[in-house]
Image (cartoon, rainbow, N blue to C red):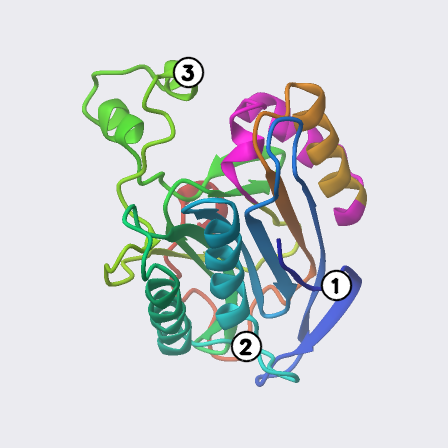
Amino acid sequence: MSHLGRDRARHRIPLPGGGAVVLGYAARSDVGHRRASNEDSVVVASPVFAVADGMGGHAAGDRASAAAVEHLSPRKGMRFLDLETLLGSLRDAARDIDALAEGIPAGVGTTVTGAALVLEDERPVFAVFNIGDSRVYGLAGNELVRITTDHSVVQELVDAGLLAAEDAEHHPESNVITRALGFRDDPRPDIVMVPARAGLRLLICSDGLTKELDDGRIRLHLAAGMPPDETAAALVDAALAAGGRDNVTVAVVDVIEAPETLPDQAGAPVQGPPDLGD
């Protein structure tokens, strides 16, 4: 298990057009009650926040998830990322993971999901990215939105109307994913742009959380108003109390302050989920 970066109660990031965005963030991870080792990894180092859940056996899975977050970890002093750098980091991680897979017939891979702070027309925006079935949620105005879509067999069944969403976590193929970083496949992340507006709270998590807590319980923890470090710890504790069948890793990112508009940008549209980006 690799944990890169450190918790920050307030991290101020100046904007090129004037003003600043202020973030608070924290991460927590636990091996769970049934696993011998923790194959999750996490990075919370602004402007990048990500969780990876490795696959391929104890040692290989751990190293695969570590490769993902290590390549995503930003250079010192970096304020914002750009999409080409993000995609390049994922490609570099995939090459390292494929090298790990030599001599492992079943292959090696990892999920990876997260949010990278980027600039769009001089405005701070989160590029939320996902490969696999780890997730990013957003809480704004006390409403929880699942920003990412799982790349999994059960999600395809749900999308096709063949399985109810509430039954997905208990389906016998709930662990079968359809996309991963590694396995000698080119990285194909979904990317959704979400404005970094004051009051937004992001949750980035491995499926060790979502297999134990439904969205309603997750929302209660996120909406309780506790700071990111206490919220992350409470979510992990709740997953362990509910069974802790898998490794569980969470990162919580708060937008504490952000400009309403920037010069010459009022009214410019930004893509994002309706409840978070309109």
Q: CA distance from mark 2 to mark 3?
A: 39 Å
Which residue is identified by label 2?
A: 80
Q: Identify which amino acid the numbered label 3 is placed on.
A: His
Which residue is identified by label 1?
A: 6
Which residue is identified by label 3?
A: 170
- Residue 266 visible to the viewer: yes
Dot placed on the residue nearer the N-terminal end, 3 or 1: 1
Tag 1 secondary structure: loop
Residue stretch in magenta: 205-229
Dot placed on the residue nearer the N-terminal end, 2 or 1: 1
Q: Examine the structure image and report whether residue 213 is included in the region drawn in magenta.
A: yes
Q: Identify which amino acid the numbered label 1 is placed on.
A: Arg
Q: CA distance from mark 2 to mark 1?
A: 17 Å
Tell me the residue at 62%/53% (across/down).
1
In the picture, measured across the screen, residue 106 lies left or right of residue 13, that is left
Image spot of residue 225 (x, y percent):
77, 38
The image shows residue 96, relative to residue 189, as above or below, that is below
Image spot of residue 228 (x, y percent):
75, 48
Confirm or deny contact between disc 2 and disc 1 (CB under 8 A): no
In the picture, measured across the screen, residue 72 lies left or right of residue 102, that is right
Which quadrant holds residue 98?
Answer: bottom left
In the picture, measured across the screen, residue 190 lies left or right of residue 60, that is left
The image shows residue 249, relative to residue 173, as above or below, that is below
In the picture, measured across the screen, residue 4 lies left or right of residue 194, that is right
Image spot of residue 109 (x, y percent):
37, 52
Residue 222 versus residue 60: which sits nearer the camera?
Answer: 60
Tell me the residue at 40%/61% (across/down).
270
Comparing marks 2 and 1, which lies closer to the viewer?
1
Give the class, few, some or many, for how many residues have Cα within 10 Å of label 3's Cα (few <14, many ≥20).
few
Tell me the residue at 67%/36% (across/down).
222
Image spot of residue 170 (x, y percent):
42, 16
Q: Identify which amino acid the numbered label 2 is placed on.
A: Phe
